[in-house]
Image: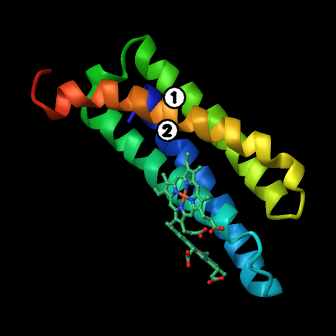
């Protein structure tokens, strides 16, 4: 695995470790307030980003060009901001709502970019 594929997969492993650590802290302290932060760290950060890594590994041509780089950076920046926003919100700071709102839109746009990259491939046109 190299390039964008490796960077997506590598970041996913980091998010898995962070998410599981948060889950463990939740379990030990019996305070589950951060459950949505934990859930999204793992299902987006670990599962979805690992899938992106495997996809770009399987279809290396898809990882070339500005569209894939835009997907990578928009996904990473939006995801990091979403996790910070969720952590603050479920830590009781509702003032962080706009962070979660803007980052959610960024993450959605990054998924649409991925759709534009993946669609021709899954439809057998590339
Ligand atoms: C060290 C490993 C893990 C620990 C200690 C852990 C711990 C927890 C805890 C304490 C909760 C809260 C349960 C509740 O309040 O009902 C939870 C919820 C959740 N966890 Fe984990 N977890 C771990 C790994 C994972 C992994 C690997 C994933 C996904 C790939 C995951 C996904 C979720 C989801 C989606 C929820 C929310 C479930 C719901 O909506 O009811 N967790 N976890
Ligand atoms: C823009 C991206 C996303 C936003 C804004 C978002 C937002 C939300 C919200 C508001 C909830 C309810 C939380 C609560 O009841 O306290 C939720 C729950 C959940 N979401 Fe997402 N979500 C996003 C992406 C995803 C993705 C991509 C997945 C799966 C790959 C996912 C899996 C889940 C799961 C398993 C739950 C239930 C666990 C929980 O209650 O924390 N979400 N999400």
Q: Is residue 29 above or below residue 124?
A: below
For the point 71% across and 45% down, which residue is it?
Answer: 100
User: 119 left or right of 72?
Assistant: left
Q: Are marks 1 and 2 in contact (CB under 8 Å)?
A: yes
Q: Along the line of sight, which residue is nearer the eye, 68 or 3? A: 68
- The residue beneath circle 1 is 72
Residue 64 picture location, percent across and down: 36, 16
Number of marks present in the image shown: 2
Q: Secondary structure at mark 2?
A: helix
Residue 105 picture location, percent across and down: 59, 35
Tell me, for residue 112, which label it has, or none.
Answer: none
Q: Earlier in the sequence, mark 1 or mark 2?
A: 2
User: 37 left or right of 30?
Assistant: left
Q: Along the line of sight, which residue is nearer the eye, 11 or 99? A: 99
Q: Is residue 88 above or below residue 91?
A: above
Q: Is residue 2 above or below residue 37?
A: above
For the point 72% across and 84% down, which residue is it?
Answer: 27
Instruction: Report the image quarter containing ligand 2.
Output: bottom right
For the point 72% across and 68% down, which residue is it?
Answer: 22
Q: Residue furthest left?
A: 124
- The quadrant holding residue 86 is bottom right
Quadrant (top left, top right, bottom left, bottom right) of the C terminus:
top left
Q: Residue furthest top?
A: 66
- The quadrant holding residue 114 is top left
Residue 25 picture location, percent across and down: 77, 76
What whole-number distance in Å separates the C-alpha atoms at marks 1 and 2?
7 Å
Q: Along the line of sight, which residue is nearer the eye, 100 or 12? A: 100
- The quadrant holding residue 29 is bottom right
Quadrant (top left, top right, bottom left, bottom right) of the N terminus:
top left
In the image, the residue with mark 1 has its CB under 8 Å from the nearest atom of ligand 2? no
Q: Secondary structure at mark 1?
A: helix
Tell me, for residue 8, which label it has, or none.
Answer: 2
């Amino acid at each position: 695995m190299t390039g964008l594929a490796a960077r997506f997969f590598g970041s996913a492993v980091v998010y898995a470790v962070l998410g599981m650590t948060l889950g463990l802290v939740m379990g030990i302290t019996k305070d589950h307030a951060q459950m949505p932060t934990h859930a999204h760290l793992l299902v987006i950060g670990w599962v979805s980003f690992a899938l992106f890594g495997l996809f770009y590994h399987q279809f290396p041509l898809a990882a070339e060009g500005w569209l894939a780089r835009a997907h990578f950076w928009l996904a990473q920046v939006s995801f990091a901001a979403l996790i910070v926003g969720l952590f603050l919100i479920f830590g009781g700071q509702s003032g962080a709502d706009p962070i979660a709102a803007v980052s959610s839109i960024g993450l959605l746009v990054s998924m649409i970019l991925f759709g534009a990259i993946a669609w021709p491939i899954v439809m057998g046109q590339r």
